[in-house]
Amino acid sequence: MGQFINNFILKYFDTSLYFPSIRWVDILEIIIITILIYQLINWINNTKAWMLLKGILVMAVFVLVAYLLEMHTILYIVKHSVTVMATAAIVVFQPELRRALEKLGEKQFLSSVLALDKNTQARFNDETKEDIIAACFAMGRVKTGALIVVERAIQLTEYESTGIKVDAVLSKQLLLNIFEHNTPLHDGAIIVRGDRIVAATCYLPLSDNTAISKELGTRHRAALGLTEVSDAVVIVVSEETGNVSLASGGDLYRNIDETLLRDKLTELQAKMTKENRILKFIRRRKANER
Ligand SMILES: Nc1ncnc2c1ncn2[C@@H]1O[C@H](COP(=O)(O)OP(=O)(O)OP(=O)(O)O)[C@@H](O)[C@H]1O
């Protein structure tokens, strides 16, 4: 043991001091690595990967003890089972890894570059915005549950196909009618594209974020889940409390009032206009180059 510590000190500390020259690329590299580590820690914190990390830490301590005490049989077993354990971890955490990669691919800068061949996103007008707000708070007052997805650049065709096609102009009355209890379309979510409701009774992916309050059920979890894998914004009206909440980018803004919902939707309209303008500009430049 003493010998080991001695060798360690000699190997790493008994050398002349060395200061490398720092280039701007090194600083860039440090920034990138810092952001990646921060994102990784965030991801680990919000998913089952936190349990995996705790398991790995316990294993690492166990292996270190085995190494220091020279337990050769345990070290032999660990050495030969590392590949199997890594493969098993990838299989077990496949949904989380998939979601993390999907999230990476949906970031604004990537989606705006990769979605160049797509049409511009369908932006909703002020009338639609006011109808959504009025319907949500009217439903909240009588405790009618609702789940409204506002589509943005990422097309939600996959989720649209889980529901019933509607394709109707959005209005307050139509929203109230759809979410009315015991009617055929009230269950699940509706998807809004531009000023139209394209589908109802859609099934959304549930979030497995462990930080969500336990008092929230599957409606809120579904709202959050979709915003974790797409750029959509989802409005939830709680059947239990009548509260209106908004999910966006994996965050849930709970119990918002009319003014805040209007602000959020107006902000969204502005973002969509800006993104559409950028898409049109890049597409025009590409066409000119051709
Ligand atoms: N994955 C899903 N996709 C779409 N809609 C869903 C999904 N899961 C649940 N829902 C909707 O949520 C309803 C159940 O809500 P639940 O009471 O479990 O959630 P909640 O978050 O507690 O909401 P509330 O406050 O309205 O009770 C279902 O009847 C269905 O309409």
Image (cartoon, rainbow, N blue to C red):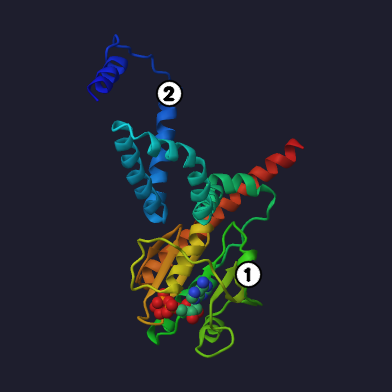
Horizontal and vertical percent position of residue 113: 61, 44
Q: Is residue 116 above or below residue 72?
A: below
Q: Is residue 127 visible?
A: no
Marks 1 and 2, the one that precedes in the sequence: 2
Q: Is residue 259 visible?
A: yes
Q: Pointer 2: residues within 10 angstroms few (<14), some, or many (20+)?
A: few
Residue under circle 2? 26
Q: In which quadrant of the rendered image does the C terminus lie? A: top right
Q: Is residue 47 above or below residue 69?
A: below
Q: Residue at x 38, y 42 (%)?
A: 38
Q: Is residue 235 above or below residue 110?
A: below
How far apart are the alpha carbons under marks 1 and 2? 46 Å
Horizontal and vertical percent position of residue 207: 46, 63
In this rendered view, identify the residue nearer to me: 68 or 37.
68
Horizontal and vertical percent position of residue 101: 54, 49
Task: Report whether 125 appears left or right of 249.
Answer: right
Horizontal and vertical percent position of residue 219: 45, 74
Residue under circle 1? 160
Q: Residue at x 40, y 70 (%)?
A: 245
